[in-house]
Amino acid sequence: MNLSVAAELMMPELGLTEMQMGWVLSAFVWGYALFQFPGGIFGEVAGPRRALTVAALLWVVLTILTGLVPGQIVTSAASVMVALLALRFLLRVVQAPLFPIPPAPSASGSRPPAGPSRTACSAPGSASAPRRRRGPRQWERRDAFCRVAPG
């Protein structure tokens, strides 16, 4: 689930201000900006298949942990903000290598085309986001993070 969509519902529940939520949302960008290049190196060293598998598994874990904040350990507004900052930063660190890692070769040894055709599918998803936005609001905030996580 996109946190910017859930932020409106999360702020009152977690006791966060708009400025604090802005910090949480910007942590996502910083993780990506700082780790895209090192993530690409990791992809070259580990290989595309292994690197993408590790990234997907960590993404699932971090997404579910985001849905569990606050919990028994994280209770105060300050600790909630620190936990969300850390989780969102780490989530983007895990996602940063997805673009620089080239697609794995198929069984025949040929690679799928790289470049714009690889990312072209992201535009329809972004364009349809306003229409899909109504759906998750019917769920509980915590359920949405677990329902969206693959696995």
Image (cartoon, grey):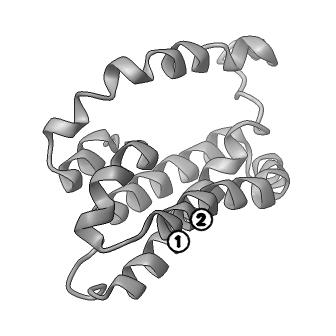
Query: Foreground: 44 or 75?
Result: 75
Q: Give the residue type that dot 1 points to.
A: Leu
Q: Please tell me whether mark 1 sits on a helix, a strand or a loop.
A: helix
In this rendering, is residue 101 above or below 76? above
Residue drawn at x 30%, y 50% as measured from the top left: 145
Query: Foreground: 54 or 139?
Result: 139
107 lies left or right of 40 = left
Residue 85, disc: 1
Q: Which residue, as the protein is rendered here, is positioned at the far front?
A: 18
Q: CA distance from mark 2 to mark 1?
A: 6 Å
Q: Position of residue 39 (x, y in %)?
A: 76, 54
Give the residue at mark 2: 89
Q: Please tell me whether mark 2 sits on a helix, a strand or a loop.
A: helix
In this rendering, is residue 105 above or below 39? above
Density class for disc 1 (Cα within 10 Å; few <14, some 14-19, many ≥20) is many
Query: Foreground: 106 or 28?
Result: 28
41 lies left or right of 27 = right
In this rendering, is residue 29 above or below 80? above
Q: Position of residue 89 (x, y in %)?
A: 59, 65
Density class for disc 2 (Cα within 10 Å; few <14, some 14-19, many ≥20) is many
Query: Foreground: 64 or 109?
Result: 64
Residue drawn at x 81%, y 53% as measured from the top left: 45
CB under 8 Å between callouts 2 and 1?
yes
